[in-house]
Amino acid sequence: MSDNNTIVIIGRGNVAYHLGQLFRERGKTIYYALSRGEKKTDEMLLLSEIPTNALMYLISVKDTAYEEVISQLNDKLEGIVVHTSGTLPLSILSKFKKKGVFYPFQTFRKEIPLWEKDFAILIESDDSFVAEQLLSLGKELTENAIQVNEETRKKTHLAGVIASNFVNYLLHLSYEILGERKIEIHKLLLPLVLQTVKRIKIDDPIKFQTGPAARNDRNILDMHLKMLESKPKLKEIYLFLTNQLLSAYDFEKLSEQVKTDNNIHF
């Protein structure tokens, strides 16, 4: 019989850490098992030491490490074996009787508290009973647990890279522009960013686009590009994204060459 209160987490990265914390808060008993490249500590189990009757075995390692970890696991594990990858197929767990995907659609860092806890968890399984069990576990953490197929999960991962990873990098570039000023940057950018992203609750964000590209304000666009002459990589990104926006509104794209104005500096 499986232990309905125990979850074994294989991995100690950002995702594993936060999911472990959340499950502990819901009263689950959590064991961490050693994965590739980790040093053994007193609080961690070897893969050969993990109990065979846990409710769930949650593998959360780098995509390139899954094959090695899975090969070391007992194929007689009684509980559900899941991976947390947004891109790997369910079939990598084919050696296990009960298997699934438990993909948390959120950005995690160990050193940063999880402020937004109502994130989506995408569930996938080839067994309807297992899927229901995973949905139930997901709903212990968030109301936003959803059963999907592999194609939807992979497309969601791609959308997340654009919406989170790319946006985070763009915020870094904004920080770079303002970083030399004696101001609290987050007080400037955070209200703007939150107002922008919350529009996604209403409709496709392109319907609410603002700024000089949406207005085809060539004077401001040219001024910005001249300001970026000393930052060629940032200028290239600005020009590319601006031209994408201009194209979306059927405006003429900007020229690749913008005359330098040496009187404008950061």
Image: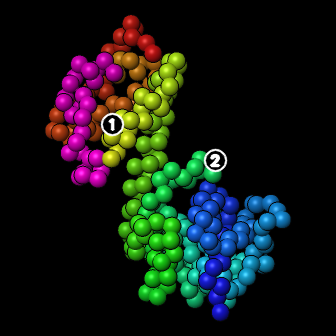
Q: Residue at x 52, y 18 (%)?
A: 182
Q: Residues within 10 Å of mark 1 (few under 14, many from 20)?
A: few
Q: Position of residue 218 (x, y in %)?
A: 22, 23
The quarter of the picture where residue 189 lies is top left
Residue 7 in view (yes/no): yes
Q: Residue at x 48, y 27 (%)?
A: 185
Location of residue 228 with respect to 105 vertically, above or below? above
The quarter of the picture where residue 65 lies is bottom right
Q: Amino acid at mark 2?
A: Glu
In the rendered image, the quadrant that contains the C terminus is top left
Location of residue 246 with respect to 164 vertically, above or below? above
The residue carrying mark 1 is 241
The residue carrying mark 2 is 111
Magenta span main SS:
helix
Location of residue 39 with respect to 184 vertically, above or below? below
Residue stretch rendered in magenta on the structure: 199-224
In the rendered image, the quadrant that contains the N terminus is bottom right
Instruction: State which tag comes first along the sequence, 1 or 2.
Output: 2
Foreground residue among 4 and 53: 4
Q: Position of residue 213 (x, y in %)?
A: 24, 31
